[in-house]
Image (tube, grey):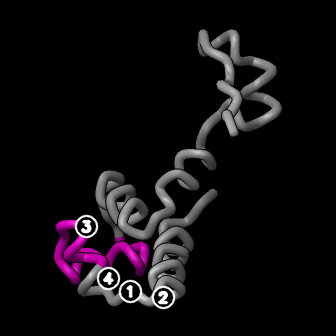
Amino acid sequence: MIEAQKLGASLQDWRILLGLTQELVAQRAGISRSTLIKLEQGAGAKLETFLTVAKVLGIADRVQEAVEPLNTDLGRARSRLLGRQRVSKAG
C-alpha cells in the first residue's frame, strides 16, 4: 500500500531538487504554505491539491503514467474490458 507520507516526502524531495521554496510552490499551486507542509508530511490533502502541486513541480505526467492501467501487462491483456487500447506514443 502506498503511504501518504511516502508520497508527500517524494513531493518534498522533488521540490528540493528543483530548488523551489515551500512559499513559491504553494503560491504557484494556489494553496497556503501550511497546506503544502501538511501535504509534504502526508498529513492529508485532497487529491486535487496533490495533482496541482505535482503539476507545479513538473511531474504530473509521471503521476498519470504511473497509474495508467494500460501501462501494465494486466491492463494490456484485459484492455477489452475497458473498451480501449493503449495509444502508442508518437516521436
Q: What element carries label 1?
A: loop
Residue 49 drawn above or below residue 20:
above
Identify the mark nearer the N-term, 1 or 4: 1
Q: How crowded is mark 2: few (under 14 residues within 10 Å), some or many (20 or more)?
A: few
**Mark 1: which amino acid?**
Leu
Identify the mark nearer the N-term, 4 or 3: 3
Residue located at (53% from left, 83% from top): 13
**Mark 3: which amino acid?**
Ala
**Mark 2: which amino acid?**
Ile
The dominant secondary structure in magenta is: helix
Q: Distance between the residues labelled 1 and 4?
A: 13 Å
Question: Which residue position holds label 3?
Answer: 29
Toward the viewer: 12 or 27?
A: 27
45 vs 61, left or right, is: left
**How many numbered dots are placed on residues in this image?**
4
Question: Which residue position holds label 4?
Answer: 37
Q: What element carries label 3?
A: helix
Quarter of the image that includes the C terminus: top right
- In the rendered image, residue 69, in percent from the top left (x then y), is placed at 65, 33
Toward the viewer: 16 or 78?
A: 16
Question: Which residue position holds label 2?
Answer: 16
**Image quadrant of residue 87?**
top right
Q: Distance between the residues labelled 1 and 2?
A: 6 Å
- In the rendered image, residue 6, in percent from the top left (x then y), is placed at 56, 73
Contact between labelled residues 2 and 4, with CB atoms less than 8 Å apart = no
Residue located at (67% from left, 18% from top): 85
Q: Give the range drawn in magenta.
A: 25-43
Quarter of the image that includes the N terminus: bottom right
- In the rendered image, residue 88, in percent from the top left (x then y), is placed at 70, 29
Q: Is mark 2 on a helix, strand or loop?
A: helix
Q: Distance between the residues labelled 3 and 2?
A: 16 Å
